[in-house]
């Protein structure tokens, strides 16, 4: 009996695993030592070194968690002035400014988001930027047709940097409309999706130890958030405390942070639509009975 071959839409090929030339276990151990001593700037430097050579997907969340322990600059409270200050700071392309830059929620409109991204892609490859973009995608931000340019640049940057989670993002987008406007053009440029990095036993153990240490070092934020809420109640006419609270909520992946940012962003159909969607999805859980 003749064999029949059924052609199916195959998944894109991934790039081959790249050789690694540094001692990953030693770098990860040094990162753990930095976290243990509270030397978070040193710790993030070692994490970036590892991720640049071997962009293991587990390093993104680790880098973001360490980054939250680094000092941040205070930007203006008014949204327009804050955005201007953000862009001016980002134009320096100084990695030490990333805690401040990534600590601010993204703008509501994809046009302003594209302006930010155009600066971020000029930074050296950094897992904190990659993690921010992946979380932004997971949050389903910027879903209009006008956002295609933003996402195309974001995904191309992730691919150029070798972020292995791009393959999973692309697979999820196979049945979405932006596959053709975002992922297909990116794949044509990259040829193949980045492949995952396989660590040896020592590096895997060192990574697990760093993960555990970072998780243990994360501060409990309930009391801090309570104080930030009180600051809002004490000064209801000021936007400053609300913006600080929004940043803290966003750092905890709490959607109320986005809601507050939207409320302070002015008016507009897209803003109102997003506020309405958040209220419908989460509003009932925000009320104390």
Image: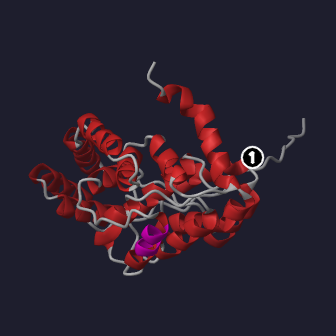
- Residue holding disc 1: 175
Q: Residue lying furthest front in this view?
A: 237
Residue 99 picture quarter: bottom left
Asked if residue 273 can be seen in this view, the reply is yes
Quadrant, the N terminus: top right
Q: Residue lying furthest bottom in this view?
A: 92
Q: Residue at x 55, y 47 (%)?
A: 138
The stretch drawn in magenta includes residue 85: yes
Q: Residue at x 62, y 63 (%)?
A: 110
Where's residue 27, x and y in %? 21, 60
Where's residue 244, x and y in %? 35, 52
Q: Which residues are magenta?
A: 80-86
Disc 1 crowd rating (10 Å Cα; few below 14, some 14-19, many 20+) is: few
Vertical order, 218 against 85 (above or below): above
The stretch drawn in magenta includes residue 213: no
Left or right of residue 6, residue 42 in this image: left
Q: Residue at x 55, y 31 (%)?
A: 283
Where's residue 218, x and y in %? 24, 42
Left or right of residue 271, residue 247 in this image: left
Left or right of residue 186, residue 284 in this image: left
Nearer to us in this view, 162 or 231? 231
Vertical order, 279 against 261 (above or below): above
Nearer to us in this view, 4 or 218? 218
Magenta stretch, main secondary structure, is: helix
Q: SS for tag 1?
A: helix
Where's residue 72, x and y in %? 27, 63
Scheme of colours in the image: secondary structure
Nearer to us in this view, 170 or 109? 109
């Amino acid at each position: 009996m003749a064999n029949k071959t059924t052609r199916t839409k195959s998944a894109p090929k991934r790039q081959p695993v790249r050789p690694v030339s540094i001692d990953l276990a030693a770098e990860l151990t040094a990162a753990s030592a930095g976290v243990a001593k509270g030397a978070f700037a040193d710790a993030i430097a070692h994490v970036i070194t590892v991720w640049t050579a071997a962009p293991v997907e587990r390093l993104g969340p680790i880098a973001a968690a360490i980054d939250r322990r680094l000092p941040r600059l205070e930007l203006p409270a008014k949204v327009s002035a804050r955005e201007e200050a953000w862009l001016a700071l980002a134009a320096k392309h100084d990695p030490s400014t990333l805690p401040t830059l990534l600590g601010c929620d993204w703008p509501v409109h994809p046009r302003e988001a594209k302006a930010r991204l155009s600066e971020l892609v000029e930074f050296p490859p950094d897992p904190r930027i990659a993690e921010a973009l992946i979380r932004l995608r997971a949050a389903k931000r910027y879903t209009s047709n006008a956002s295609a340019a933003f996402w195309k640049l974001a995904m191309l940057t992730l691919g150029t940097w070798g972020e292995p989670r791009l393959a999973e993002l692309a697979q999820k987008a196979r049945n979405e409309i932006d596959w053709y406007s975002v992922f297909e053009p990116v794949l044509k440029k990259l040829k193949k999706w980045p492949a995952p990095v396989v660590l040896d036993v020592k590096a895997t153990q060192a990574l697990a130890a760093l993960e555990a240490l970072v998780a243990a070092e994360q501060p409990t934020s309930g009391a801090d958030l309570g104080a930030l809420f009180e600051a809002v109640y004490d000064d209801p006419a000021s936007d400053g405390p609300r913006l600080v609270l929004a940043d803290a909520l966003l750092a905890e992946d709490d959607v109320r942070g986005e809601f507050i940012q939207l409320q302070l962003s002015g008016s507009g159909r897209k803003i109102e639509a997003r506020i309405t969607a958040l209220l419908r999805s989460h509003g009932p859980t925000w009320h104390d009975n």
